[in-house]
Image: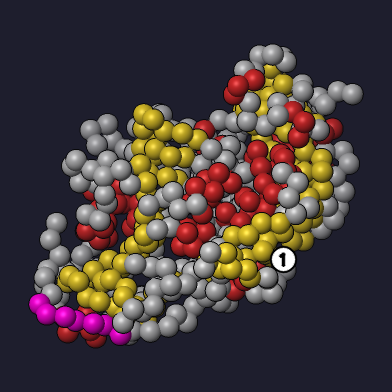
Amino acid sequence: MSKVFKNAGEAVYDIMSGSIIMIGGFGLCGIPENCIAALEKRGVSQITCISNNAGVDDFGIGLLLKNKQVKKMIASYVGENAEFERQLLEGELEVELIPQGTLATRCMASGYGMPAIFTPAGVGTEVAKGKEVREFNGKQYLLEYAFDADFALVKAWKGDSFGNLVYKATARNFNPLMAMAGKITIAEVEEMVEPGQLDPNEIHTPGIYVHRIFQGANYEKRIEKRTIRKLDQ
Amino acid sequence: MLDKNQIAQRIAKELKDGDYVNLGIGIPTLVANYIPDGINVILQSENGLLGMGPFPIEGDEDADLINAGKETITTVPGSSFFDSAMSFGMIRAGKVDLTILGAMEVSENGDIASWKIPGKMVKGMGGAMDLVASAKNIIVAMMHTNSKGESKLVSACELPLTGINCVKKIVTNLAVIEITEKGFLLLERAHGVTVEEIQNKTQGRLIVEGEIPEIAF
């Protein structure tokens, strides 16, 4: 059975309202633009979204928030999105803010087949409320559970029909972790190549984790904060 | 009184050759501009990069290459990329020597609050909770008082905590302060700032032992 799909619309055909969906990326860097646009178009609602950030008001996950398609957001940092903050403060949106390393490692645990992890992040803070605390070697750790996501939507630089993926620079971030963690993982790539063209030594995500793959189109790759220096600096 | 760049410049004196350093958003980012001659440090950006370089020159910006503040950056020779789990793995395992970050409040026992003002501002903790829970050395860069003129160096934090018993040192616009078992130990004062002024603007217990030298660069 081929993993290759024609486009985002076809690849997300069975994502239903109420799904738990992981979305890769850090800020706007490495986000699955095509899949997000397809979700927006498909009009699914009441989704639980697991992603480090919530996009900006008019791009990334911000598009789904604006349409009120998101019931619950699980993220570590949402500071770049005014609409998100408004919905949160007015109680229109359920939000679970969790430490970034905890978020990453709960994805990893899922992809590694481990039910839970222990981390010191959040000990003594409101993040620890209701969680089991265990001491190892004199230091306290919180028990945090692996995520259980229906779908993972990730973006890679290159991929092949086996689902093998390679990411570019810091656009890697959460993508390989979420790719491992989805019950169904959908990868969009900037460049689809023939099997054998990717060096097996350099593959970041082995194809076994990827269920569907397609060549993305019309990447905007918006830069959130363009910072530059003068030549003589 | 120090400006933001001078706070960064003073903190840069704390860097040791060979340190792996994570710089938070705001004043901490400026520390990279003042790394002393002869000191080589490797900057870690928790979104998945060791060996962060300066901002790119115009035209070289790459949407796929940003720092944790979402700013376009470059890499230095010898840099490496990795995923977010490995990034926080190296933080959790204590491989990152020094974390420099901002704060809204720091208490005299080293608790830090930096991520939330209930009912007003919710941005999230990002990677700060992971960093303060595991870094070997944590320095806070911040103004001594908030916009209302209230002390940010307090006996106990009122705002939601980011981490407990973790901050080692604070560099503000007025002073350099070490967190000790007895409270805030005043180490240095900014040029033209008296010990009395620092005392008045420090709500937590301030310990003053002997002559307090001025901050030198």
**Numbered disc 1: secondary structure:** loop
Where in the figure is residue A97, as x and y percent of width and height? 63, 63
**Residue sitting at 36 percent across and 59 percent down?**
B137
Chain for numbered disc 1: A
Where in the figure is residue A85, as x and y percent of width and height? 60, 64
Taking A89 as reference, is B101 left or right?
A: left
Q: Quadrant of residue A141?
A: bottom right
Taking A176 as reference, is B214 left or right?
A: left
Q: Is residue B208 covered in magenta?
A: yes
**Residue sitting at 77 percent across and 38 percent down?**
A185
Where in the figure is residue A61, as x and y percent of width and height? 67, 49
Tell me the chief SS of the magenta region: loop
State the quadrant of the C terminus of chain A: top left
Res. B205 in view: yes
Taking B131 as reference, is A160 left or right?
A: right
Q: Which residue is mark 1?
A: A93
**Residue sitting at 65 percent across and 38 percent down?**
A176
- Range drawn in magenta: B205-211
Taking B194 as reference, is A210 left or right?
A: right
**Coloration mode:** secondary structure
**Residue sitting at 82 percent across and 26 percent down?**
A3
Residue type at numbered disc 1:
Leu
Count of picture labels: 1
Res. B69 in view: no
Q: Quadrant of residue A96?
A: bottom right
State the quadrant of the N terminus of chain A: top right
User: Foreground: A47 or A136?
Assistant: A136
